[in-house]
Amino acid sequence: MGTVLVLASTDRKGRIRESVGTLLSMARRLGDPVTVVAARADEVDDAVETVTAAGASKVLIAEITGTGEWRENAELEAATAAYAAVNPIAVLAINAVGAREV
């Protein structure tokens, strides 16, 4: 089985969305779940703890500085870089406005 990239979207306050746990469960059925998170420096520890507890085998962090629309752009850039780095067999993302760009 190959790597499955899970895009761990965050809300405007930087918290990992609850639906990411469901995506990680689905990813484990397909392969090795690797999660990418775009987070500010003060959010990284909580983000890593959340996605690891939900089943991510590896977490890739893209540190960002902005919020709001900047955050969505950073998530898109992080997803693009992660895709190039891990060459996944599948990419899973939530159905949200920010994730539609991916």
Image (spheres, rainbow, N blue to C red):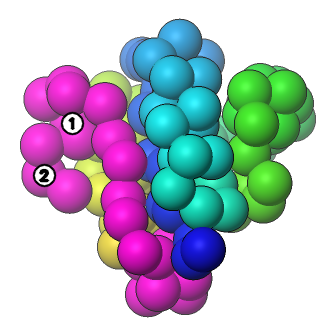
Q: Amino acid at mark 2?
A: Glu
Residue 86: % across, % down: 56, 82
Circle 2 residues within 10 Å: few <14, some 14–19, many ≥20:
few
Residue 17: % across, % down: 50, 17
Q: Give the magenta part as a residue range.
A: 81-102
Q: In this rendered view, identify the residue nearer to me: 97 or 66.
A: 97
Is disc 2 placed on a helix, strand or loop?
helix
Residue for badge 1: 98
Asked if disc 1 and disc 2 are in contact, CB closer than 8 Å, the reply is: yes
Q: Looking at the picture, does residue 98 appear above or below residue 37?
A: above
Number of residue marks: 2
Horizontally, residue 62 falls left or right of residue 41, namely left
Image point 59% across, 32% down: which residue?
Answer: 25
Residue 39: % across, % down: 61, 42
Residue 62: % across, % down: 60, 60
Q: State which quarter of the image contains the C terminus.
A: bottom left
Circle 1 residues within 10 Å: few <14, some 14–19, many ≥20:
some
Residue for badge 2: 101
